[in-house]
Image (cartoon, rainbow, N blue to C red):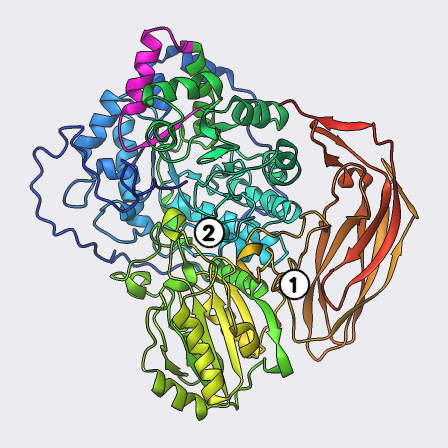
């Protein structure tokens, strides 16, 4: 989900929303100055608790129950339209930052709304970050009113719990999706989803707008960090476990939520890198690369889906019969509830100009797509337009019935008809040490060592180390966007908003060394100016080594648009000045949501660590990596560009194209020497229904124990009429190796996995030699060749367009 562009007619998250559409504020005496306060609710989280793991799962959405069909028939047209309407919480908050019950009654009585979304903290609520207790008081009161007013049907509350329940005070904020992908271990995606679900239910919300499954192709894109990287297979594996984490046995387990695969489809390849930019993606390439993660989420049982902002090949996704009916429903078999993104029906008229007005946009959305709920967000336009369309006979009531049935079935599956209120018992688990450790473990295995000349790392406790840079002394910069607030904590919030639910790199350093580290800021986060640079240089001259933390200010969506990948000039200048004048080994730690350009820092730094956005508890894991308490095992889930021209380079681009990035997809170093040998393939030929087994020996020569990501890629040597991929990730496994230990890793490869979509939208196999490579572009690169044999005219699958 997302807020509208600030240039549009709708307000963005955090903006003051005028609810004069109702008389709700008429009798309110405004006494509050509008400055948000810290929620003073305190509790002692349980150290640990029991939960259901991946084995206890049920299927996802399916046929509509008979009692739900009866309920739909009993509803009036107005009530049906209301169930299909979702509005944001700012419309029911008064000028004192409190719940406006009169406004709630207005929206339930007049418009019969069936769903609310968002956090009061994002919309002028009194508190900047609502505790589970106060959040639940808010949502429970709305639910109480819903049960006695309007349609008397429980509302479903949606929340962007994209990396933990990031809008709930004390909830563990996990590393961003790109960092989770860097672990190359989908279990971490499961952990983040499960804990996000529990903490969301503690706040009285039932629906997470996650996971984010767009491929991060254009690295300029401000939403790169939200996704599981650029690769279809890696993203698909993360998607599957993420859905299981969020939902589990969601039809019985009331600590789980409905997941929402998003954003369908093609959102991650904006032509110019700007959020919502037009995407030029050929239909067969869409099926080949962009669809698989969504297919994996659907197969895993995702209860809901969200359509994508903007246009693909000039066609509005929101109004597309092909994307939202033919592809999503018919070909991929999605049976769940489909919601629009924020104000996206209205945006057809006021942003993209793909409709004359809101009424026409509403008509096309209902006639041409299978959308079930409009995240109208800010007004009653959907209700008004749909009512008129029903009255004039343009839209049939039966069209509403299909959507309302799916919405009510979802509410039933989530237990809202039996237990509509927050489970107060869950609040005691929010912020549990068990959850914090799960987040830290994710960061430990995500952080990626990109350079380590002369074994500068790990640091020794006996060394005098100077720490410099704005990201080393900040929790919020490690969190990024979708962290406390949509855009992350404001400058006014600072780190104080966390109230202890987080750490910093400096705190992590102190916990390891036992002493407060020597620290100087050196430069501001926006890179506008260096800070006391002479003092930094003098201190650096007295140190054995210097660690410099660089990175990005918090951002989300269009407010994170950038014109170039290069980090701010003054940040890079800080490293250059230290390296040139102090002449001491320099370690650079990157805290960033996308792979930013480093200029001469690549050569000047002796070591470079990419921490991504490791979350509110990322400080200790970074410190552990720096001091060798943890051996880095993260691997890049995206191609790290060396130039602006490489912003959209991927590991799966055509093999004839130049691929010379700063660091390739899948790259990452550790502190130990790992070698690969004895690659064997069980058969010389690979045929349909006759898989082969690939084995490789992996040895750790020390000096530390290490987890190693073993990645298997295919590279077809030629493909008749179609340029083959440079490399396609087919399988991966992460193994733990003690010093001097060798393990044999096995992968099963099927010919069907090497099939591709052609421009006639047929999925087939072209015979040719195929090189199976382990960890290409590294010193561990080893390969074997098999002959792919198949009838090139045999069609495994086909799609209409």
Q: In the current view of this chain or complex, which residue is farthest to the bottom?
A: 542
Could you tell me how far apart the alpha carbons at marks 2 and 1 are, in whole angstroms?
24 Å
Q: Which residues are magenta?
A: 372-397
- In percent of width and height, residue 79 lies at 32, 17
Residue underneath mark 2:
163
From the viewer's perspective, is 450 left or right of 134?
right
The answer to which of 472 and 310 lies nearer the viewer is 310
Q: Residue at x 52, y 19 (%)?
A: 64
Q: Is residue 538 visible?
A: yes
**Image quadrant occupied by the N terminus:** top left
Q: Is residue 425 in sight in this rendering?
A: no
- Residue 689 shown in magenta: no
Q: Is residue 234 above or below residue 679?
A: above
The residue carrying mark 1 is: 667
Q: Nearer the viewer, mark 2 or mark 1?
A: 1
- Residue 312 or residue 173, whichever sits in front: 312
Residue 207 image position (x, y, % from top left): 43, 38
Label 1 CA crowd tier, 10 Å (few <14, some 14–19, many 20+) = many
């Amino acid at each position: 989900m997302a807020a509208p562009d600030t240039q549009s007619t709708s307000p963005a998250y955090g903006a003051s929303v005028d609810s004069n559409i109702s008389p709700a504020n008429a009798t309110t005496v405004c006494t509050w100055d509008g400055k948000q306060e810290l929620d003073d609710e305190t509790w002692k989280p349980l150290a640990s608790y029991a939960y259901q793991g991946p084995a206890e799962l049920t299927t996802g959405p399916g046929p509509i129950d008979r009692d739900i069909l009866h309920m739909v028939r009993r509803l009036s047209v107005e009530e049906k339209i209301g169930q299909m309407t979702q509005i944001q919480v700012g419309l029911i908050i008064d000028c004192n930052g409190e719940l406006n019950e009169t406004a709630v009654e207005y929206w339930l009585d007049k418009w019969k709304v069936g769903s609310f979304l968002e956090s009061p903290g994002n919309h002028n609520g009194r508190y900047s970050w609502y505790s589970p207790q106060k959040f639940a008081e808010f949502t429970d009161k709305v639910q109480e009113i819903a049960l006695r007013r309007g349609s008397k049907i429980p509302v479903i509350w949606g929340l962007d719990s994209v990396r933990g329940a990031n809008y709930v005070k004390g909830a563990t904020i996990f590393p961003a999706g790109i960092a989770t992908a860097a672990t190359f271990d989908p279990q971490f995606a499961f952990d983040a989803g499960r804990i996000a679900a529990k903490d969301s239910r503690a706040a009285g919300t039932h629906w997470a707008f996650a996971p984010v499954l767009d491929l991060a192709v254009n690295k300029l894109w401000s939403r790169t960090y939200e996704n599981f990287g650029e690769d279809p297979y890696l993203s698909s594996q993360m998607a599957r476990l993420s859905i299981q984490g969020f939902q589990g046995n969601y039809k019985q387990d009331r600590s789980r939520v409905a997941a929402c695969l998003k954003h369908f489809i093609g959102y991650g390849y904006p032509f110019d890198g700007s959020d919502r930019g037009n995407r030029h993606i050929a239909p067969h390439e869409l099926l080949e690369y962009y669809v698989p993660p969504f297919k994996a989420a659907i197969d895993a049982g995702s209860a809901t889906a969200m359509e994508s902002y903007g246009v693909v090949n000039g066609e509005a996704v929101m109004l597309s019969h092909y994307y939202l009916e033919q592809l999503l429903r018919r070909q991929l078999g999605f049976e769940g509830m489909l919601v629009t993104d924020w104000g996206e029906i209205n945006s057809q008229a006021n942003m993209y100009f793909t409709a004359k007005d809101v009424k026409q946009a509403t008509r096309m959305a209902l006639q041409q797509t299978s959308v079930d709920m409009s995240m109208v967000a800010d007004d009653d336009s959907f209700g008004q337009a749909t009512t008129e369309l029903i009255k004039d006979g343009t839209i049939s009531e039966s069209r509403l019935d299909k959507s309302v049935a799916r919405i009510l079935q979802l509410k039933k599956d989530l237990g809202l008809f039996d237990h509509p209120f927050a489970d107060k018992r869950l609040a005691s688990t929010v912020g549990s040490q068990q959850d914090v450790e799960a987040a830290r473990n994710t960061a430990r295995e995500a952080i990626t060592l990109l350079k380590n000349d002369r074994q500068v790392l790990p640091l020794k406790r006996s060394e005098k180390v100077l720490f410099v840079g704005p990201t080393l002394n900040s929790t919020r910069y490690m969190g990024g966007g979708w962290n406390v607030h949509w855009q992350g904590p404001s400058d006014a919030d600072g780190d104080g908003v966390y109230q202890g639910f987080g750490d910093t790199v400096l705190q992590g350093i102190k916990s390891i060394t036992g002493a407060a580290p020597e620290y100087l800021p050196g430069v501001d986060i926006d890179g506008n100016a260096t800070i006391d640079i002479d003092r930094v240089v003098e201190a650096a001259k007295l140190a054995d080594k210097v660690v410099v933390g660089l990175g990005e200010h918090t951002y989300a969506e269009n407010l994170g648009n950038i014109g170039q990948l290069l980090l701010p000039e003054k940040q890079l200048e800080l490293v250059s000045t230290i390296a040139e004048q102090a002449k001491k080994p320099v370690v650079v730690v990157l805290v960033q949501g996308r792979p930013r350009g480093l200029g001469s820092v690549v050569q000047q730094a002796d070591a470079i660590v990419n921490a991504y956005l490791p979350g509110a508890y990322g400080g200790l894991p970074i410190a552990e990596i720096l001091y060798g308490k943890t051996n880095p095992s993260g691997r890049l889930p995206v191609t790290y560009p060396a130039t602006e021209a490489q912003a959209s380079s991927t590991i799966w681009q055509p093999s004839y194209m130049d691929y010379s990035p700063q660091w390739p997809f899948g790259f990452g170093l550790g502190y130990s020497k790992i070698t690969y040998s004895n690659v064997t393939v069980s058969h010389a030929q690979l045929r349909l229904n006759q898989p082969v087994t690939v084995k490789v020996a992996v040895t750790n020569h020390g000096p530390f124990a290490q987890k190693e990501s073993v990645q298997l890629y295919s590279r077809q040597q030629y493909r008749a009429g179609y340029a083959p991929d440079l490399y396609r990730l087919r399988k991966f496994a992460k193994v733990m190796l003690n010093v001097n230990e060798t393990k044999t890793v096995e992968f099963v490869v099927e010919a069907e996995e090497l099939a591709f979509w052609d421009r006639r939208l047929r999925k087939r196999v072209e015979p040719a030699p195929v090189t199976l490579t382990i960890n290409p572009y590294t010193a561990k690169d080893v390969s074997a060749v098999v002959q792919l044999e198949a009838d090139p005219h045999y069609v495994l699958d086909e799609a209409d367009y």
